[in-house]
Amino acid sequence: MRRRDLLKAALTLPVLPWLVAPTFTAATQAAGRLGVLRSRVRPGQPGWPTVAQWDQLKKTVGGRLQALRSPFEACTPNDPACQQALAQINNPYYLGDEAALTQTSGWVDAWTSRPSAYAVAAESTGDVVAAVNFARDHHLRLVVKGGGHSYQGTSDAPDSLLIWTRHMNRVDLHDAFVPQACEGIQEPLPAVTVQAGAMWIDAYDAVTTRTGRYVQGGGCNTVGVAGLVQSGGFGSFSKNFGSASGGLLEAEVVTADGKVRVVNAKQDPELFWAIKGGGGGSLGVVTRLTLRTHALPDTFGAVFGEIQADSDEAYRALMAQVIGFYRDALFNPHWGEQLVFHRDNTLRLSMVFQGLSQQQAEQTWAPFLDWVRARKAYRFKDEARVIVLPARHFWDAEFFRAHAPSLIVSDDRPGAPRDHVLWAGDQGQVGQFIHGYRSAWLPQSLLRADRQGALVDALFAATRHWGTSLHFNKGLAGAPADALERSRDTAMNPASLDAFALAIIAGEGDPAFPGMPGAKPDLAEARAEAARIDQSMDALLQAAPGAGSYVSESNYFERDWQTSFWGTNYPRLAAAKQRYDPEGLFFVRHGVGSEGWSDDGFTRLPRT
């Protein structure tokens, strides 16, 4: 895991039930009288499709219907599937290639990774249409998975039908793309079209390594393109290029009626807006996306290091110094990623930059590092260092194999694409079992000279309970005006535009898929860690009460999640949901319109 107008949101919250719940309740009552809306069915219940009906679906999708079984379901030393899974448990590419597995194995007292009953391994939009129609007609719980990177467990559900888009991974480049029906309205732009099953490494390899341009995507190579864009989407360089959703020009979406819609600013503009940050799996199945590309900076680089303070007083002073340094020198489009404040009074530097030379980056950091070195209260556990490389090589696996092999981990399976690598720093996320996860957008007002003290006090108090990281690239304050404008025209919580950072406080354990042999998670310790994580975030929020949270990186148990995730945008999102999915076919827990369902998405809730 090393890896939103608040006043308006607060005023909106009390009326949300009146804006949203009656809409869905009215639809539920009307549809219920027509016999088309009801709770979903499970295997063995009346209404579950017959063998003949499943066979017909299989025929419709060209044989690409699979009955799913976890490789750990009956794990023995003689079971080759189980032994392969155990050998590849730390390989995110393997996990993504298994329809029955997910990139996160579960969350204590929240959810556990369990496969769907069946999956359509879609290879075309027609396969997706067939699966959507089948699920709707048979009242099935429907799940959509591309990359499978869901901390909240939204990309799997037992007893469901999975639309698995992994094999839809084509990437196409455009020199001058104009969305449908937008000729004469929008200027042609360089762009890339990516199918829903592609990962960001696929996009980066095609756009940057091979072509020398840039597309704003995610920081983790194995995250799915479609899921990240639908959640808003931040990457290491978002402080310059904005959110991934802000770069969306057009998308193909299969809606609950089985219709294939090409959506953009002209065609179905409300659905287009809603999928830009409204959360994946709630509004339809996105099958392809077209994103603008940008001129590539000359350089990308990073600054690493770790500083130990010898006392609480010295640590607080270090916090104050680095926050002031960030405000004066790093609060601009060049800098992203994070500072990590540990409980043991250490500060880890894990920053990236774009468009600067080695000398410029070193000169930027010199005042802060000189301040540290001039004081006996500090020592470098890991000496600060600046790394710079030509930007075209940032996702170039062969370049890293030759020059910095320790920074990457390759997919070591026979025949694996050579570009399929993982940042070594992301290895701890693979298969993780989450103990707790909290995030909060910190407003840029906290960087004012008269507020920095309050921020430092809250940071220090938070670290007495748990480590705290500030992800500067996941708050868009300080970004250029054009990037802010593109990101403003999305469904993300508007507080993200005023935030200088997203604070993340989280903890996890080793993979714990059901049935895995070996040691089981220490649930008591996991719950104790979760409590400390909550205490840490509660302390930090003393400086930012009511701060919103990023939907993709947030608390499973988030209270007032509509306002936390989407702020003042939620009523508009709810209206889009009602327009395009009035029967509630698409469901994710704490997703748009989920108020009308039980947490597992199977049971309709009575009107309150």
Image (spheres, rainbow, N blue to C red):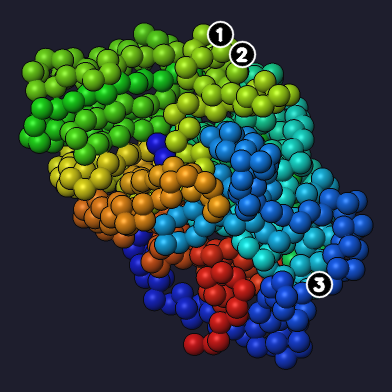
Q: Where residue 468 sits in the image (x, y, percent)?
A: 29, 42
Q: Report how far apart the C-alphas of labels 2 and 1 lie in the structure.
A: 6 Å
Q: Secondary structure at mark 3?
A: loop
- Residue type of the residue flagged with mark 1: Ala
In-front residue for pair 233/32: 32
Q: Is the Cβ of the residue at disc 1 closer than 8 Å to that at disc 3?
A: no
- Residue type of the residue flagged with mark 3: Pro
Mark 1 vs mark 3: which is more N-terminal? 3
Q: Which residue carries the number 2 mark? A: 398
Q: Is residue 40 left or right of residue 502?
A: right
Q: Is residue 59 left or right of residue 475?
A: right
Crowding at mark 3 (Cα within 10 Å: few <14, some 14-19, many 20+): many
Q: Residue at x 72, y 43 (%)?
A: 166
Q: Report how far apart the C-alphas of labels 3 and 2 lie in the structure.
A: 49 Å
Quarter of the picture containing the N terminus is top left
Q: Where residue 355 sits in the image (x, y, percent)?
A: 47, 18
Mark number for residue 402?
1
Quadrant of the image occupied by residue 215: top right
Q: Where residue 45 sits in the image (x, y, percent)?
A: 72, 79
Q: Secondary structure at mark 2?
A: helix
Single out the mark in the foreground, 3 or 2: 3
Q: Which residue carries the number 3 mark? A: 49
Q: Is residue 87 above or below residue 468?
A: above
Q: Is the Cβ of the residue at disc 2 closer than 8 Å to that at disc 1?
A: yes
Q: Is residue 34 above or below residue 172?
A: below
In-front residue for pair 387/6: 387
Q: Is residue 437 left or right of residue 323?
A: right
Q: Secondary structure at mark 1?
A: helix
Quadrant of the image occupied by residue 555: bottom left
